[in-house]
Every structure is written in structure tokens, then in C-alpha cells.
Amino acid sequence: MSAQKAIAIVGANSLQGEALLAVLEDQDFGFAGVHLLDVAEEAGGRLMLHGQSLRVEPLESFDFSSVAVALMALEPEQVIACMPRIREAGCIAVDASGALRSVTRVPLVVAAINPQALASAVEAGAVNCPDAQTLLTAQVVHPLLAEAGVQMLSVATYQSASTLGQSGLEALALQTGKLLNGQPADAGLTGRQMAFNLIPRLGLLDESGNTQDELRMVNDLCVLFDLPELPVQVTQVLVPVFYGSAQVIQVQNQEALEVARIPVLLRRNRNLKLLDKPADNGFPTPIEQASGSDRLWVGRIRQNPQDPRLLQLWAVADNFRACLAMNQLQVTQLLIKDFL
């Protein structure tokens, strides 16, 4: 089960594909080989990895039986279209697009939280990985669960334009350029001005006043924590920056934690990095600490003076690299090591 096996990155030219390659360049996951794939119109070019120039092959003609795991970095409809070929070849897809959420037997996995769920992945032929916002919240909160329990969780996310993909980056750049040159900016992609603005809603609301993405994050956190009745409130905000994610996370514990104990618990997750000092710059930001980093950064840790069970934290991350890419690669590494 621990023999080295080859993997494929499907969607190598996408933002997520670029992040996967960047992490692989800096870290050794022990894979026997890496194949780069993309849809036919995006294939044919070459990308560098460990000093080698690798051709991006068309996924339509690729033999998936030559790799053990396919890391999906495509749009949901593209993932669905190529899943039959992947399964027939005996390859396992590790997907973070949400395309396989409706397939109930496909496990939702965060490598640092519930790796045991991978036991059902071989039969299912796939693994679901949460989106970047869920990954950030889940990994910050999870170390606190066993020690003090959680009664309630409230999260406000501050998401960059890259959350919307390449089209989001282009829309923000275009609007910013126009406004700086005294021209009006079209609403475009979000229906509201993105540049120099904050948008506290991404998508249509349901009867409860939540968006689909907010409800999905609520559901996924409950699944990952195995706490189906946990009250979770999420507000997702689009902010006018290009890359990165930030969150204000408020946790109501069942029991009060000693302040000195909190950093000890958080450091149990090797993906977390703390920067929480009283000095001027003693906190992390998406640009200064998180950009290009494989770690999830946490700071501004404090208890409520009136109720010490209430804990508030500030967390930032490179949404593609530290969240999506790292979890996909860690899940793949565990899958090969323990189940293939």
C-alpha cells in the first residue's frame, strides 16, 4: 500500500492547477510521477516542475489507468464529464469543485481532520474536498473541539476576487483600471461594482436569507466535525483584493479555555501558523504572511471579557495554495500510503 504511485493534475492551466504545481515544486510528496492534463483547447503547452519541462496532455485521450489518483482542477461540469473514464480506469478522483457532492457515497475529507473517511474512497472512486473557506475554518476550529467542545460557531469570510476564478480577477482589474482613470465601471460578473467596494452576498438567497455557498459551508463544517446539530452561522463577503482569504471566527465553547492553552491546541495542526503578538504588526494579513505560503495563519486570539467561553480568532490563507492545493495533495498522499 505504501509503494510510490503516479498522479495526474487535471486542469493544469487553471488557477488551482497552478497552485498544485507550485506546492509540488516546493514540497516532496513522494509521488512516482506527475502527469499534466487539460481540456483539448488548453493542452499542448509545457510547464516546468523540478527543472523538467512537462507537456500538458489532452485529457480526452489520456489513459487514466497509468495513474493512481487524478487531482481535479476543472470546472464542475468538466469534472462530471470525465468521471466515467476515470472510474472505469480504476483511478480515484480527488475533487474540490463540488461536482461530486450529490454522490452520497463519496466521502468529504480534510486530511488534517478526518483521514479515516478515506476508507470508502476506493469503492466510491472519488474523494470530495471542501472549498477554501470551509477548509480554513475547519482546520482552525477543529483543534479546540476535543479540549472544550463547541456549542456555536459564527464565521464571516472576506473572500478575494480569485474566489470567482479567472473571470473574477479580470473583472476586478478592469473595474479598478476604469475607476482610476475616471471612467464608470460596469457591474459585470457580480451585478455590483467589485472595485473599491464590499459585497456581502455572493449568489441568490433562499427563504432563510442564506446563499447556497453559505449553506454548503454550514453543512460541510457539521459533517467534518461530526456534529450534525451544531449551530453554525456564515456570512460570506467579497472584498476588492485579487488573492487570499480572511475570516473572523467566533467560537462558543462548552467550557472556558485558558488563554495560554489556545496556542498549544492550535499548533497540533501542522498546517497552522500563529502570529499573535501585542506589538504593532503582531498579526497576519493575506498579502504579507499568507500569499505564497502553504500554512494557514491565525492571530488576534482573544476571549470575550463578559463570557470567557466566547473565543474570537482572525485567520488568513492563500486560498488556492494553502487551502485547496495543500488539502488535495495531503489527501492524495494519505490515499496512496494507506489505501492503494
Image: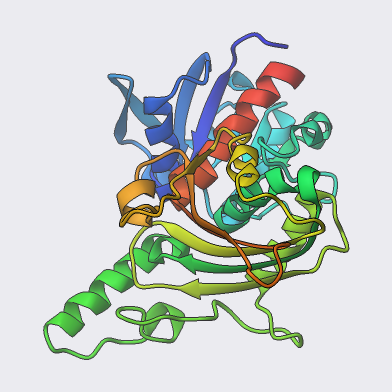
Q: Is residue 333 above or below residue 214?
A: above
Residue shown at 67% from the left, 51% from the top: 141
Looking at the picture, tell me which residue is in the foreground, 88 or 321.
321
Q: Is residue 73 visible?
A: no
Q: How is the image coloured?
A: rainbow
Left or right for 229, reference 59 = right
Single out the residue that lies furthest toward the right.
229
Residue shown at 46% from the left, 19% from the top: 28
Residue shown at 36% from the left, 86% from the top: 187
Looking at the picture, tell me which residue is in the foreground, 273 or 234.
273
Q: Is residue 328 above or below residue 142?
A: above
Q: Position of residue 210 (x, y in %)?
A: 68, 80
Q: Position of residue 311 (x, y in %)?
A: 65, 61
Q: Is residue 201 above or below residue 19?
A: below
Single out the residue that lies furthest toward the left.
181
Q: Is residue 203 above or below residue 112?
A: below
Work out which quarter of the rendered image holds the C terminus and state it: top right
Left or right for 144, reference 319 = right
Looking at the picture, tell me which residue is in the foreground, 242 or 222.
222
Looking at the picture, tell me which residue is in the foreground, 24 or 138.
138
The quarter holding residue 197 reads bottom left
Q: Is residue 64 visible?
A: yes
Q: Position of residue 44 (x, y in %)?
A: 34, 36
Work out which quarter of the rendered image holds the N terminus and state it: top right
Single out the residue that lies furthest toward the top.
3
Label tally: 0
Residue shown at 73% from the left, 57% from the top: 220
Q: Position of residue 193 (x, y in %)?
A: 36, 85
